[in-house]
Amino acid sequence: MVAAFLSGCSSLGGSGPSSRTIANAAKPGSELAADIKVVELTDAVARQVLASRKSSLLSEVFGDGEAYDSIIEPGDVLDVAIWEAPPAALFGSASTDARITSTSTTSRGSNLPEQMVDSAGRITVPFAGSIQVAGLTPQQVGREISRRLDGIAHQPQTIVRLVRNAAANVTVVGEVASSVRVPLTPKGERLLEILASAGGVRQPVGKTTIQVSRGGKVAAMPLDQIIREPAQNIRMQSNDVVTALYQPFSFTSLGAVGNNAEISFEGTGITLAQALGRVGGLRDERADVRGVFIFRLEDPAALDPELVRGARLTPDGKIPVIYRVDLKSPTGFFVAQGFPIHNRDVLYVSNAPVADLQKFVNIVSSMAFSVAGVANSL
C-alpha cells in the first residue's frame, strides 16, 4: 500500500508546477526550451527591464510649445467695430444741429454684424470692400480696414476681435465628461486646462492614462504623473487630439500566496515587492521561498540578446519569459523592490517540496487511522 502511494505522490493535488518542473522547462533538450525562457531575476536583469520600459515623457516628445498667436483662418468668426472722430458721418450718425456738429467732441462708432471668414479667407466690410484676412492677426486686419477707409471715413479707427475660433482647436475624447473641441486662445492653454474644459475625466485619476496625438507623433502618460510633474502639463497646439484612456491594470496571483485573485493596480505601476504585499505575502506552511515566478510575454528589448537569439516569438513579437526570484536571499528583496509588475503578469509561488511530503503523510495518516477504526469496530 505504501509503495502504491509513493508511486502516486507526483499526482497529489497542487496549485501549479513545482520549481524543479519550471527550471527543467528551459534546459537544453527540453521541448519547451525554445518556447519559454527562464531568467534568474538579478539586479542587472531588473535594471535592463526598467530601462526598456521607460515611457517617453510628453515634454520630451512634444516640448512645451508656444501660445496660440490668434492667426485668422477660414471658418473663424470676427467682430468688426469702426470708430470715427467727430463729426462722424460714414459709420456714425451725423447731427442735424449745427451747434452740436461744430462743437461735439464725441466720437461715433458702429459695430458691423459678425462675419465668418469664407473658404477663400476673406470678409467684406462696407466701403472697404473684400479683404483677405486669412493668415493675419486681428490687429493686422484692423489696420488694413482703417487704411482702406482713410479719406472715406473721418479719421477711422478699427477694432477687430476674434469671436469664435474655428481653426485652432484641441479635440478631447475618451473617458471625459464631454467629448468636445476646445478652442485655443493667446493665453496658451495647457493639457490639464483642456481636460478641465471637457468636464474632467470620468474614471479615477490613478487608473486613467492621457494620450496626446500631434502631427503623427503619439505619446501617453498616466494622468497622476502629469498632475505630479508640472513639466508634463504641456501647452497645447492647434489640431492636437487628447484621449483619456481608462486602463485598469492588473496581475493575477496564483499558488502559495495569501490571496489567489486578479489584483488591480494603478497606471503608475507597482513593484514585485508591492505585488507580494497586496496578495498577503507567501504562505508559511506551503510556499517555496526560492520558487517565486513572474510569467510574462516580454519585449525582446528587455532581454539579453543572447537569450533572444533563436527564441520563438509570439504573433505580436513577444517572448514568453518566466522570471525567477530567490527570496531566501536578502538581495532578492532588494531586487523585488525595483522590479516592475506589468499589466497581465502572472505571479506564481510554487509549493515547497516538504509541502507535498506533508500532503502524503496526511493522506497515509488518514488512511491508517481509518483502517484502525474499522479494525476496532470489528
Image (spheres, rainbow, N blue to C red):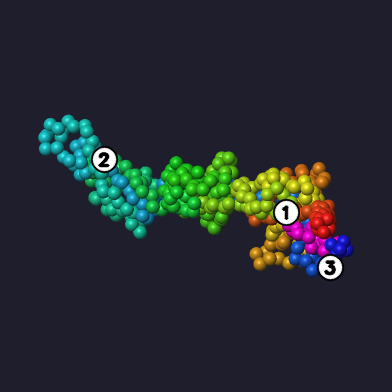
Q: Do the numbered discs 1 and 2 sit on residues whose CB atoms are within 8 Å?
A: no
| Lateral position of residue 91 relative to residue 195, left or right | left
Q: Which residues are magenta?
A: 6-21
The residue beneath circle 1 is 255
The residue beneath circle 2 is 83
Taking the magenta stretch, the answer to whether it contains residue 358 is: no
In the picture as drawn, the residue positioned furthest to the front comes out as 378
Q: Which mark is residue 9?
A: none
Q: Nearer the viewer, mark 3 or mark 2?
A: 3
The residue tagged with tag 2: helix, strand or loop?
strand
The residue tagged with tag 3: helix, strand or loop?
loop
| Lateral position of residue 291 relative to residue 76, left or right | right
Residue 238 visible from this viewpoint: no
Q: Position of residue 1 (x, y in %)?
A: 86, 63
Q: Do the numbered discs 3 and 1 sit on residues whose CB atoms are within 8 Å?
A: no
Report the Cα–Cα distance between label 1 and label 2: 82 Å
Residue at point 60%, 47% (across, down): 266
| Lateral position of residue 275 relative to residue 222, left or right | right
In the picture as drawn, the residue positioned furthest to the right comes out as 3
Mark 2 residue crowding within 10 angstroms, few (<14) / some (14–19) / many (20+): many
Tell me which label, 1 or 2, sits earlier in the chain.
2
The residue tagged with tag 1: helix, strand or loop?
strand
Residue at point 37%, 55% (across, down): 74
Q: Is residue 155 above or below residue 15?
A: above
When asked about the image quadrant of residue 300, the answer is bottom right
Taking the magenta stretch, the answer to whether it contains residue 9 is: yes
Q: Do the numbered discs 3 and 2 sit on residues whose CB atoms are within 8 Å?
A: no
What amino acid is at disc 1? Gly
| Quarter that holds the C terminus | bottom right
